[in-house]
Amino acid sequence: MPMPHQTYMQVIKRRLVGKEGAERVRVLRAALDELPGYKNGPYADLRKWVMDQMEESRVRARATHRDSIAVRREGAAQIALVGAPNAGKSSLLHALSDVQIKIGNYAFTTLRPVPALTRIGGVLVQFVEIPGLIAGASEDRGGGRALLGVLRGADAIVYCHDVTAPLDALREVRREVDLTGIDLPAILAATKVDEADGDTLARLRAAVPELPAVPVSVLDDDSIEAFKQEVWRLTGLLRVYLHHDGETKEEPLALWPGATVADVAESIHKDVGARSKGGRVWGPSARFAGQQVGRDHPVQDGDTVEVIA
Ligand SMILES: Nc1nc2c(ncn2[C@@H]2O[C@H](COP(=O)(O)OP(=O)(O)O)[C@@H](O)[C@H]2O)c(=O)[nH]1
Ligand SMILES: [Mg+2]
């Protein structure tokens, strides 16, 4: 008596996790050989499903070879979302932006890095989902090398881990990233917290104390907002508001840590940067509102600056 067909489908799906291209086709062909050869009924349907999967894998393999996977940089910083299949990366990307992203309950819905722009405190930040990094990715499994190449170009990493999933899923992904020698500032998005109790999150935090964990649920807007603030901190960028002609511009500049009033002036125009003697400052770096400072005065996140040329 063969295995019930539903069980069989799950077995095949499980075997397919992490398999791409030729390897995926091989698994499917082997499954086809094992299936009872009924001409109709649920087993015939299952057979058809396997064949469709094979065709899709072949098309996909061709597509991955043809298309470059480079991601055009946009915004003030590029943040990579990294994690095992089904960790909730696409859902998080979707919650952060307006782009339409395929979300599915199966592995490898996303095949290529998917960028999306988000405004954090008025500054555009680019998130890039790095799909399905799996064990062996650093040796190019699942097209891993190209994906890790995209990751290398990012400014920071958000590891995504489903709080209800075994910790090994996160460990494997981190190992592949480490093996590639990529060492970027990182935090951990503990995803799907709506499905877990407080203990689960506490256990995750205890297991990976070196990665600050931010609980997120795409069902909870406040968690997404708090997550954005953590990401902002992660970028290390400084928001500086320009004050000019008695008005403060609504959109802040984004500057790298260590930026000075001279850099603020320079961002207005090169000539202004060269000419500027200093400025007036309001906010965190000012000892009092409107303090007059020299051009070498370091600005801080949230400052308002009036450049004196
Ligand atoms: N309950 C709940 N489910 C989620 C959440 N985020 C993602 N999921 C589900 O988890 C599955 C995998 O999500 P997806 O974003 O495609 O994961 P990816 O493979 O990492 O891109 C989907 O069925 C999502 O609906 C969440 O915050 N809460
Ligand atoms: Mg995805």
Image (spheres, rainbow, N blue to C red):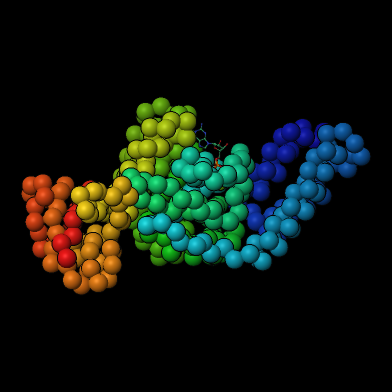
Q: Is residue 72 visible?
A: yes
* Horizontal relation, residue 68 to residue 191: left or right: right
Residue that appears at 43% across and 30% down: 220
Q: Is residue 188 visible?
A: no
Residue extending furthest toward the right: 39
Kindly give the residue lying farthest to the top in the view shown: 197
Q: Quadrant of the N terminus?
A: top right
Q: Residue at x 74, y 38 (%)?
A: 8
Q: How many marks?
A: 0
Foreground residue, 154 or 214?
154
Q: Seen in the image, is 224 located left or right of residue 143?
A: left
The x, y position of residue 143, in whole percent, is: 59, 62
Residue in front for this viewpoint, 223 or 96: 96
Q: Position of residue 236 (x, y in %)?
A: 28, 54
Where 3 sits versus 54, above or below? above
Name the residue nearer the viewer: 81 or 196: 81
Q: Is residue 174 left or right of residue 2?
A: left
Is 89 positioned to the left or the right of 2 in the image? left
Where does residue 171 sit, x and y in percent of width and height? 44, 49
Above/below status of 41 relative to 288: above
The quadrant where residue 201 appears: top left
Query: Where is the C terminus found, in terms of image quarters?
Result: bottom left
Residue 257: percent from left, percent from top: 24, 59
- Closest to the observer: 192 or 286? 286
Which residue: 40% across, 63% down?
Answer: 182
Q: Residue at x 77, y 32 (%)?
A: 4
Q: What residue occupies the far front of the structure in this picture?
A: 245
